[in-house]
Image (cartoon, grey):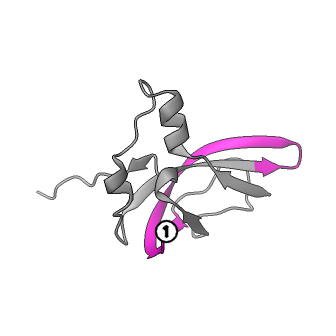
Amino acid sequence: MKYTLDNGEEINREYPETFWMPPRDERESLLPGEIVKLIFRISLEESLHVERMWVVVEERNGDSYVGVLDNDPYCTTELRAGASIEFCPEHVIQIYEKLPQA
């Protein structure tokens, strides 16, 4: 099993009317504890699966981030919640918005 992350900026350029992304400055200023969605392309033997999954940001590492996968993919048990994921701002397609506490 291998995976790559889709570049959301490229998808946004190709489909700007239907593929929205958070502004670049928000994706470049993520803080530990924030939750982001990434697109994973998971290769399994002869098949390719695409899944959008949540990752919890742990730290910034230069121009990239290190986070922890927050859910399990449907297509494999080789990649599980808790796995360390390195990603860049261009991979972030959504930032989880926490609801205000009452």
Q: Position of residue 16 (x, y in %)?
A: 44, 28
Label 1 is placed on what type of residue?
Answer: Tyr
Quarter residue 82 falls in = bottom right
The vertical placement of 52 against 83, above or below, is above
Q: Which residue is mark 1?
A: 65
Q: Is residue 97 left or right of residue 49?
A: left
52 up-or-down from 3: above or below:
above
Q: Residue at x 29, y 51 (%)?
A: 97
Q: Residue furthest top?
A: 17
Residue 84 vs residue 19, the one in the foreground: 19
Q: Is residue 65 magenta?
A: yes
Q: 64 or 97: nearer the eye?
A: 64
Q: Main secondary structure of the magenta part?
A: strand
Residue depicted at x 36% and y 45%: 22
Q: Is residue 27 left or right of residue 91?
A: left
**What secondary structure is marked by label 1?**
strand
Q: Looking at this view, is 21 or 98 the one in front? A: 21
Estimate the x, y position of residue 86 in percent, counting from the top left.
Answer: 57, 67
* Magenta stretch encompasses residue 13: no
> Residue 51: x percent and y percent?
61, 44
- Give the residue drawn at x 45%, y 32%: 19
Q: How many marks?
A: 1
Q: Which residues are magenta?
A: 43-69
Image quarter of the C terminus: bottom left
Q: In which quadrant of the rendered view does residue 47 lie?
A: top right
Q: How crowded is the residue under tag 1: few (<14 C-alpha within 10 Å), some, or many (20+)?
A: some
Residue 65 location (% of width, % of height): 49, 68
Quadrant the N terminus occupies? bottom right
Instruction: Write the residue at 82% across / 50% down.
Output: 44
